[in-house]
Amino acid sequence: MARQRPSLSLGQSDFAALRGEERVYVDKSAYFAKLRRFGWTLSLARPDGFGKSLLMSALDAYFSGEKGLFRGLAAARTLDDPDFQPFSVLNFDLSLKGGARRRSLPKRLLELVQSCAARHGARLREKSFAPAVVELAEKVARRGGREIVILVDSYDEPMTRALARGLRRGDEEAAWRAQETLREFFGALRRVEALTAFRMVAGTTSSAWLEDSADFEACDVSAEEEFAGLCGFDSQEIRRYFAPHLKDASREMKIGSRELVALVERRYGGFAFDGKKRVARPLSVLKFLRRKKCGDFWKERTRDGLIRGFFAKNARPVDFFHGESVEGRFARRPTDILLADPLGFLYQTGFLTLRARPEGAFVLQYPNLEVYARVSALFLEKARGRAESETRADARALREALAQGDVAALGDLLRAFFAELAESPFAQALIKFDRERFHHFCVKAFLAEAGFPARRGDHFERDGWDFVIAFPEVATAIKIFVAREGEDWETLARSGFKGSPNLGELEGTARRALFYAREGRVALDARATLPGGAREAEEGEEDGQLA
């Protein structure tokens, strides 16, 4: 009888359940012994959707000595070593899922400690979470007769959730209150250091604030080259572990397997936490393989709330920080997310990632098309003051105009778009920084919402045009002219139109439109060519792409 192939592990963060159900597990267990040797207190920061909870669950099973769960995995050899000694593990998940979130954070933390005690068959007398942590550690260590291991998953989620909620409600102090409560929790863990053989915390943000305020010192492995692949899938892992699923998607989408992997990397990969090794976000990859088509899987309530709050506090779009240079120490110790430093905030929330430079410095960039498209959608929602669903409707109309080479309809849409920006206080606050760059980004964001993110990072320009969108049957080129204060913008635009470059495939254009958005002091030149003059869309992409 043929063995049933493993199913996708989407939504499963319990390692024992995943292995019991024979789901796909991308083996990361070779890192476990290395983590133990690297230090006795470690911290790891990765954006949401990178499998941190599954990692912590697997570490729980590893340190508990559950050999059966690791058959066929890299860690099996270590666990079979006679010298390996299992530990009692206290595993705290601070995402606090399943509880009544309306209860206070101290009460929910106490319930979490009591739940952990029940798993170890311990009864606690303490009725406050911090003393209860100490009591639990002492009882478990005494009962086992050996040191314990402490794991804390989603250690910062109460803080980031409070920050997103506070930014929405105008109560930023909520995040500081949550952080203060977490300090008490980690202060209790510090008091049982003598009983602890190994401890590790994982979350979305840097743990530097714990060292500064709770005296909880941890070696941050987030940017260590040795652990760059600890969370996330590289291209080799995608090919190895998901071969049957890639074959199904390849057949469904009618593209080759090599092009499919390249598409996955372009849309969902590109994250580099040491600036070098690039990995894809596991949650997005798994959702893509299940649906067998591209989608926006980056959308998440807390993260969306954080970026909306960022737009409210910072009078610059994320695009203005794309390409910003940072020193090597930034990756190892970004600023506390509550201090609202734009670069630290955008890096820790996953909207920007690192690219290494030869001289040892780094540059921040969008990791992939999925992240860029989500940034664009949220920015347009704020800039236009309209619901995301309304922007999507306009984006569909924009896509239809481009698909038909209808430059008149394109002009109407963009004129209305710039008129809205002229009425938006948020947009006007941004314009003062860089009028030309702002309007360029707005059109780029609008095109991304219509399904035309740039294939190669942030490079849209082609042969002197700002945007070139090509379908198999029609290609459209757009040039934007933005007048600075005091300039005669209509004269400037007309002279610019005369000098608009010809694009090889657009020579002898069938349609051309020159149009003005007077409210935004913007003029645009659009040209479209009909059958015979456009290149074919790249294999593996949807029809219609930005060159």
Image (cartoon, grey):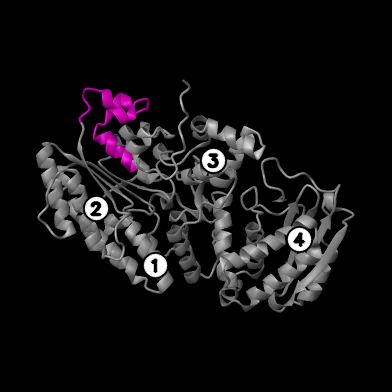
Q: CA distance from mark 4 to mark 1?
A: 39 Å
Mark 2 sits on what residue? 216
Nearest to viewer (mark 3 / mark 2) = 3
Nearest to viewer (mark 2 / mark 4) = 4
Mark 1 belongs to which amino acid?
A: Arg
Q: CA distance from mark 2 to mark 4?
A: 57 Å
**What element does badge 2 sit on?**
loop
- Residue 36 lies left or right of residue 415; in this view the side is left
Q: CA distance from mark 1 to mark 2?
A: 27 Å
- The answer to which quarter of the image holds residue 79 is top left
What percent of the width, then of the height, locates residue 201?
A: 30, 48
Region of the chain picked out in magenta, as a range: 56-85
Does 113 appear in magenta?
no
Find residue 401 and name its label. 4
* Contact check, label 3 and label 1, Cβ < 8 Å: no
Find residue 165 and name its label. 1
What percent of the width, then of the height, locates residue 442?
A: 64, 65
**What element does badge 3 sit on?**
helix
Q: Residue at x 41, y 45 (%)?
A: 223
Mark 3 belongs to which amino acid?
A: Leu
Mark before the other along the chain sequence, 3 or 2: 2
Q: Is residue 443 above or below residue 422?
A: above
Q: Residue at x 56, y 41 (%)?
A: 265
